[in-house]
Amino acid sequence: MALPIGHHQTVSQPTVVGRMTQALEVGPRMKVLEIGTGSGYQAAVLARLCRRPYTIERHPPLLKAAEERFRRLGLVNVTTLVGDGTRGWPEQAPFDRIMVTAAA
């Protein structure tokens, strides 16, 4: 069961995050784009597995809270953006992998 995180958004169960991460086959030199930062949980996992995760969130308060979590965890390789994930992040492309954790 997904857990609510505010703004009518949820965070996936840890088992779902684990399966999605495993399916992505992330490597330590990869640059990964995540669409839908939410709580920042998935980006934090990616930060330990790849060179640089880039994450986009459309709700500024959620992104601000996630950025604070990254700071407290010492995750300095996560790059964030408030924006529309459907547009991607052309300024930072290309990416080795793209993960969509947002739902319509």
Image (cartoon, rainbow, N blue to C red):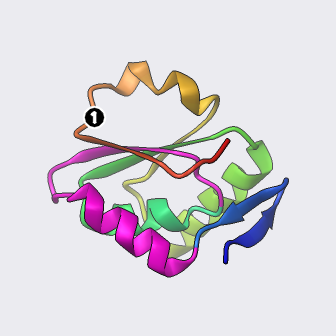
Q: In which quarter of the image is the N terminus?
A: bottom right
Q: Residue at x 46, y 80 (%)?
A: 15
The three-letter amino acid code for the residue at tag 1 is Phe
| Residue in the foreground of this view, choosing between 24 and 80 | 24
Determine whether 56 is above or below 40 in the image: above
What's the magenta region?
13-38
Q: Where is residue 64 in the image (x, y as percent from the top left)?
A: 70, 53
- Can you tell which quarter of the image residue 71 is in? bottom right
Q: Which residue is drawn at 58% across and 52% down?
A: 37
Callout 1: helix, strand or loop?
loop
- Number of numbered discs visible in the structure rendering: 1
Q: Where is residue 6 in the image (x, y as percent from the top left)?
A: 83, 61
Q: Which residue is drawn at 57% across and 77% down?
A: 13
| Residue in the foreground of this view, choosing between 71 and 85 | 85
- Can you tell which quarter of the image residue 22 is in? bottom left
Q: Is residue 33 magenta?
A: yes
Q: Is residue 44 magenta?
A: no
| Residue in the foreground of this view, choosing between 37 and 99 | 99
What residue does disc 1 label?
A: 95
Residue 95 seen in this snapshot: yes
Q: In the displayed orientation, state which residue is furthest to the right.
A: 7
Determine whether 79 is above or below 27 in the image: above
Q: In which quarter of the image is the C terminus?
A: top right
Q: Position of residue 4 (x, y in %)?
A: 78, 69
Q: Where is residue 21 in the image (x, y as percent from the top left)?
A: 34, 64
Q: Is 57 placed left or right of 22 in the picture?
A: right
> How many neighbours does mark 1 have within 10 angstroms: few (below 14), some (14-19), or many (20 or more)?
some
